[in-house]
Amino acid sequence: MSDFGVQDPGYRHGATVTVDSEERLRALLSRPLDFGCRPSIVRLDNGRFRVDVIGTAAQLDELITAGVEVELQPVPLERAEVGEGDRFAGGVVPRGFGRKDRGR
């Protein structure tokens, strides 16, 4: 099995999958992959179909083994935690949209 550069086997990767027929597209859509709220299927000029999916390395490996073209999307870099300090200090709950104070 490929590790796709991530240690966690349960990590869900984004990928673009291309199939060569409507029959293979229907088979792809019946798999337990995440296609988002509304699958975005693009019919290419050459009669092939492309769709974005989210799945584990094992699920994507199954597609590759079945001869499906899978283009892995880059793994996002880790991001720093959103804020510092206690937003609810003194029992005051923030209201509204707030503002971002840079370095104050």
Image (cartoon, grey):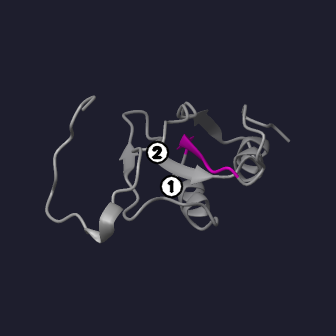
Q: Is residue 23 magenta?
A: no
Kindly identify the residue that appears in the image at 73 percent across and 31 percent down: 5
Type of the residue with mark 1: Glu
The part of the chain drawn in magenta is 11-20
Say which quarter of the image contains residue 77.
top right
Residue 22 location in percent, x, y? 50, 55
Circle 1 residue: 22
Q: Name the mark nearer the viewer: 1 or 2.
A: 2
The quadrant of the image that shows the C terminus is top left
Kindly identify the residue that appears in the image at 41 percent across and 59 percent down: 39
- The answer to whether 72 is drawn above or below residue 98 in the figure is above
Along the line of sight, which residue is nearer the eye, 80 or 54? 80
Type of the residue with mark 2: Phe
In this rendering, position of residue 29 left or right of residue 58: left
Say whether marks 1 and 2 touch (CB < 8 Å): yes
Residue 61 location in percent, x, y? 76, 45
Q: Secondary structure at mark 1?
A: helix
Along the line of sight, which residue is nearer the eye, 76 or 91? 91
Q: Earlier in the sequence, mark 1 or mark 2?
A: 1
Circle 2 residue: 49
Residue 55 location in percent, x, y? 63, 53
Say which quarter of the image contains residue 44.
top left
In this rendering, position of residue 52 left or right of residue 94: right
Kindly identify the residue that appears in the image at 73 percent across and 46 percent down: 57
Q: Main secondary structure of the magenta part?
A: strand
The quadrant of the image that shows the N terminus is top right
Q: CA distance from mark 1 to mark 2?
A: 7 Å
| Neighbours of disc 2 within 10 Å: few (<14), some (14-19), many (20+) | some
Q: Secondary structure at mark 2?
A: strand
